[in-house]
Image: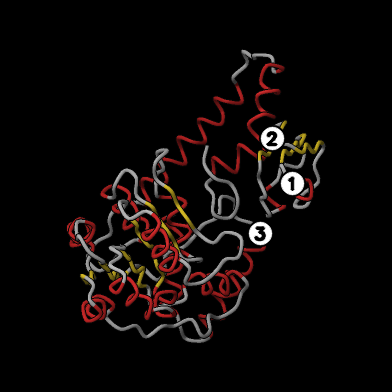
Amino acid sequence: MGMTGIFGIESGFQTLMECDTLLLLGADFACGQFYPDKATIIQVDRDGTHLGRRHPVDLGVVGDIGPTLDALLPMLAPREDRSFLDECISHRDKALAKRAKEEEAGEGELIHPQHLTALLDRHAADDALFTADGGSPMVWVLRHIRVNGRRRTLTSLLHGTMANAMPQALGLQKAFPGRQVISLSGDGGLAMLLGDLLTAVQENLPIKVVVYNNSSLNFVELEQKVEGLLDNYTDLKNSDFGRLAEVIGFYGRTVTRSEDLEAAVREFLAQPGPALLDVHSNRAELVMPPQIEARQVAGTALYAAKTVLGGRIEDVKDLVGNFLKK
């Protein structure tokens, strides 16, 4: 049904919130507001200290997942009523249609990060390894990279680390030299660790680095807006990362127009050595949670009012325009 939580989609959220029994298998999901209020919650974990530490549970079981399921499954009675399943599938179909619309190409200089990620998903190897920086790239990899049992995604969900993607890619490429490794890097994250690009050249690691270049610490900026704050200290004055990569020894290319993007992605992924693709993506793109809370609406409205009073009407027009597209 898809993920739940702030990075999830509507179908995953609805399925968990409306269920009557929730079985947590080795899960350590921290966001209490995304647990169902009325369901019976059962948690299985080999570490007893994890039971109930994120949210109260009705039954905690210490044990490995495999043997526990082997013992549990024969005790379950088959059911013929599939009304809840059909309802969940309906939510899933709507969520997938919404995701497909978000992945459509923009026009001219409008490059949607969802479209970029969908192109990476389409053209990457079937067993590719993906890493993503904490912030917006992490959202896009979790929502728009389709797993197939062979692909793997690696982020920093526990710590929310900035600039984790490219170093993780270096390690994965060293550990799995025969597989394609793709780093979804924010512009702020990459700028923090530019020197490590030299490591890829020095160690002959053919990592592929995609820069989501929106000239901002974008997720921090979104958090400020939701809290009703004018965005401060989030602007980034970026260099041309494509040209900079070439100087270091990478294949490098910068893309600023949507119609050039797919060919650039294919060429970038086909490079035999380390490669970097600098993509100028939409700064005003919104990361929408599966459920919008009244507090978030009020905070964003306060931000809009402050922005208008501060003479930044274009910022509000961009924000409203992107919201209406959602």
Quick one: 9 or 31, which is closer to the camera? 31
Q: Secondary structure at mark 3?
A: helix
| Circle 3 residues within 10 Å: few <14, some 14–19, many ≥20 | few
Which residue is labeled 3 in the image?
294
Q: Quadrant of residue 235?
A: bottom left
> In the image, is 70 to the left or to the right of 312?
right
Which residue is labeled 1 in the image?
47
| Circle 1 residues within 10 Å: few <14, some 14–19, many ≥20 | few
Which residue is labeled 2 in the image?
23
The answer to the question of whether label 1 and label 3 lie on touching residues, with beta carbons closer than 8 A, is: no
Q: Nearer the viewer, mark 3 or mark 2?
A: 2
Cα separation between marks 3 and 2:
29 Å
Three-letter residue code for mark 1: Asp
The answer to the question of whether label 2 and label 1 lie on touching residues, with beta carbons closer than 8 A, is: no
Quick one: 59 or 66, which is closer to the camera? 66
For marks 2 and 1, the one nearer the N-term is 2
Three-letter residue code for mark 3: Ala
> In the image, is 141 to the left or to the right of 21?
left
Cα separation between marks 2 and 1:
16 Å
Q: Nearer the viewer, mark 2 or mark 1?
A: 1
Q: Nearer the viewer, mark 1 or mark 3?
A: 1
For marks 1 and 3, the one nearer the N-term is 1
Quick one: 200 or 294, which is closer to the camera? 200
